[in-house]
Image (cartoon, rainbow, N blue to C red):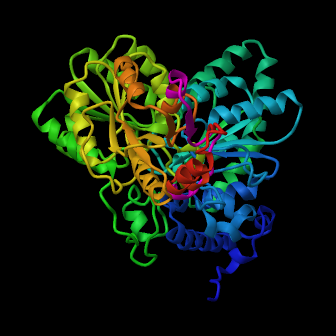
Amino acid sequence: MKQKRYGILDNISSPADLRGLSYDTLGVLCAALREFIVDSVSQTGGHLASNLGIVELAVALEREFDSSRDRIIYDVGHQCYVHKILTGRRDRFDTLRQYGGLCGFMKPEESITDPCITGHASDSVSVALGMAHARTLKNQKYHVVAVIGDGALTGGMAYEALSSAGTSREPLLVVLNDNNMSIAKNVGGLSRHLSRLRVSPQYLRAKTRIKERLSRIPGGGTITRAVSRFKAKIKRAVLPTSLFEQMGFTYLGPVDGHDLKSVCEFLALAKKMKKPVLLHVMTQKGRGYAPSEQYPEKYHGVSKFDRVTGAPLAAKKEDFSAFFGKELCALAEKDNRICAITAAMPSGTGLTRFAEKFPERFFDVGIAEEHAIGMAAGMAAQGLVPVAAIYSTFLQRAYDQIVHDIAIEGLHVVLCVDRAGIVGADGATHNGVLDIAFLRSIPGVKIFCPSDFAELRVMLSRAIYRETGPVAIRYPRGSEGAYRKELSAQPLVCLHEQSGSEVTIVTHGIMVNQAIDAAEILMHEGIRAQVYKVNEIGSGLEQAYAEVKEKLGGWCVVAEDVVPNGSVGEWLAAHRSERTDLLNTGDRFLPHGGVNELYRHCGIDAEGIAAYIMKNRNGKENGVG
């Protein structure tokens, strides 16, 4: 099949190739980039709308800065596709988010132009300021730029960093990519004109000369201060700058982020300013592809889709998130104490329907997990039943609030831990392999592990109505597997009993499917294996776990899609005298790839579990994953 050509894009091998091009030619390049991105992401899946919206801004950044030396940090990182394409990785874009291929986020291992790993929101300004401090302390010369979206600016960490950066006096550029929520009123041509005037060389030189001359005459200082106060009042009246300028930044903009010439001019001016600068750029999310322009949230993160129609290539099955949302709505119909909280993920966590049906009891706090859990504690203290649905990898950020605001007081908050376990294509920053470890370490927290939808229904109802303290329900991304039962009444249940078993496979959650299949493989090899499923994890289960130890005689292999530290396997190994082997994701961060590929990579798929047992059945080895 003949490879598709993309015109001028085919001749761009590095950012250096951009600097001799006219603005008209760069505009043609931007159109080619959008076509390439849509073609590529339709085949691999990935983040589409955010990358289509940032094309001109990303081209301008690569043109005005040297990303091999200057540090350009894309917040979250899901908007870095143009950066990757222009920095020598276009030929590998068909491997995006695939096992062994390009990461969907910035990754220093791939290129010196990626200054740090990204994947979570709101930390770019903090990291950028750290790099700026390092530059100053080491007496080096390079520019530092943080590109942060208005969504990421809802995270409190961003404001902590902006406050610190503004008072640091470090030369630092923060580019606010505003593609949805206008945090400051755009007053059009007057604002842009005054912004350009304030940073033009002629203005800056004239301002300096006037100050010098006034300082030489009697009362000059008083006149200077009066003029500055008057100017500040005028600026506050006509420019949306007060928040950032009060933090110590020089505010530029807003500028049309799709007017490439204007963006380049502003970036060039910002580079010359030896202080903290914030450039406000207005962009359209999903620009250049009609379906994503119309439904930018739907096309934020996509699976493979039809390039012409925008329709997904695979029919979407009901997943754990959607099922959770449906069940929560059913419970909330009958109980007006139930509230739902999420941190900028209403669709991802299945809460869109809840938001529509119960808008007064639905709270999307933005990218602010710490606040979400603190607020849940306040609700619980006053008699409501808050249900906070947050991805496992993002719940890490609220560890202190779970401890300090919820667990110490024993408040009844239900944590619905979405995307638990191996997530896959989004890689190390998104795999939910740490939640059992950090939740199990907190006194009073109980963790439920449903293996299918029926168990999720029962456990959600139980968490709301039968529990009194903090309780978490962890479930994976995607749909249920072949296991379709409801055996969640006990902390431990036997799924696959065999008399005279040589080994017991212990697991929990969706991993039961791998364990049952492994037992079947072993049976065909003449090895008897039984499978036990753990339904509850956490403190307060000492008596139940005492019974677990009694039931689990002989050799146990504990298979989990989590890290070993803090795992169920670690607990059992510490409390059993019999041999207990651990199979898990290992003491490491996993690469990106499909979930089944990563199961195989870790040796926790059915074949891997069976192979391990066959290899080690003589008891000569004691493997720890």
Quadrant where the N terminus lies? bottom right
Residue 592 horizontal side relative to residue 215, left or right: left
Quadrant where the C terminus lies? top right
* Residue at the spot 27% in from the left edge and 37% down from the top edge: 488
x and y, in percent, of residue 407 in the image: 39, 16
Residue 515 horizontal side relative to residue 484, left or right: right
Residue furthest to the left: 334
x and y, in percent, of residue 522 in the image: 48, 55
* Residue at the spot 69% in from the left edge and 36% down from the top edge: 128
Compare residues 240 and 376 and report the one nearer the observer: 376
Compare residues 509 and 101 and report the one nearer the observer: 509
Compare residues 607 and 168 and report the one nearer the observer: 607
Any part of residue 579 in sight: yes
Residue furthest to the right: 139
Any part of residue 256 in sight: no
x and y, in percent, of residue 482 in the image: 34, 57
x and y, in percent, of residue 14 in the image: 78, 65
Please say if 469 is above or below 12.
above
Magenta-drawn segment: 572-597
* Residue at the spot 45% in from the left edge and 19% down from the top edge: 442
- Dividing the picture into quadrants, the one containing residue 296 is bottom left
